[in-house]
Image (tube, grey):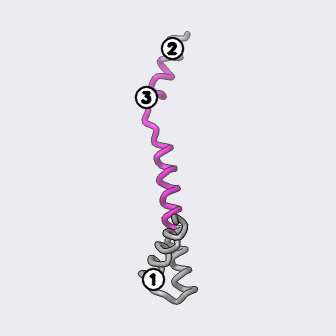
Amino acid sequence: MAGVLEQLWWPLQKRPKTVAKVFSNYRLDSKILELETAKEILREVFGTSKEEVEEMILLRLAEKEA
């Protein structure tokens, strides 16, 4: 009986772990979308260009690191 169960279980263990990759890609995509949305909001609120928003973010990150 144990041999039969091992034969059933073995292919499941050998199967590639794609679920973790799919969810990590989903999380990454949602973070990218969140960042792009935040940039768009900053452009609208401050009436600035895309480049100015990028500069604001970089300056803010530099302040946090210092």
Part of the protein shown in magenta? 7-33
Residue 4 image label: 2
First of labels 1, 3 by sequence position: 3
Q: Position of residue 44 (x, y in %)?
A: 54, 86
- Residue closest to the far front: 66
Q: Amino acid at mark 3?
A: Lys
Callout 1: 10 Å neighbours few (<14), some, many (20+)?
some
- Judge whether 49 appears above or below 23 on screen: below
First of labels 3, 2 by sequence position: 2
Q: Amino acid at mark 1?
A: Glu
Disc 1 designates what residue? Answer: 52
Q: How many labels were placed on the picture?
A: 3
Residue at figure coordinates x 43%, y 28% from the top left? 14
First of labels 2, 1 by sequence position: 2
Callout 3: 10 Å neighbours few (<14), some, many (20+)?
few
* Predominant secondary structure, magenta span: helix
Q: Horizontally, is 31 left or right of 15 in the view?
A: right
> Mark 1 or mark 3: which is in front?
1
- Judge whether 66 appears above or below 7 on screen: below
Residues at marks 3 and 2, CA–CA distance in whole angstroms: 16 Å
> Mark 2 or mark 1: which is in front?
1
- Judge whether 63 appears above or below 10 on screen: below
Q: Horizontally, is 25 left or right of 41 in the view?
A: left
Residues at marks 2 and 1, CA–CA distance in whole angstroms: 65 Å
Quadrant of residue 1 in the image? top right
**Secondary structure under the numbered disc 2 in the rendered image:** helix
Q: Position of residue 57 (x, y in %)?
A: 49, 74
**Secondary structure under the numbered disc 3 in the rendered image:** helix
- The front one of 25 and 41 is 41
Q: Is residue 14 magenta?
A: yes
Disc 3 designates what residue? Answer: 14
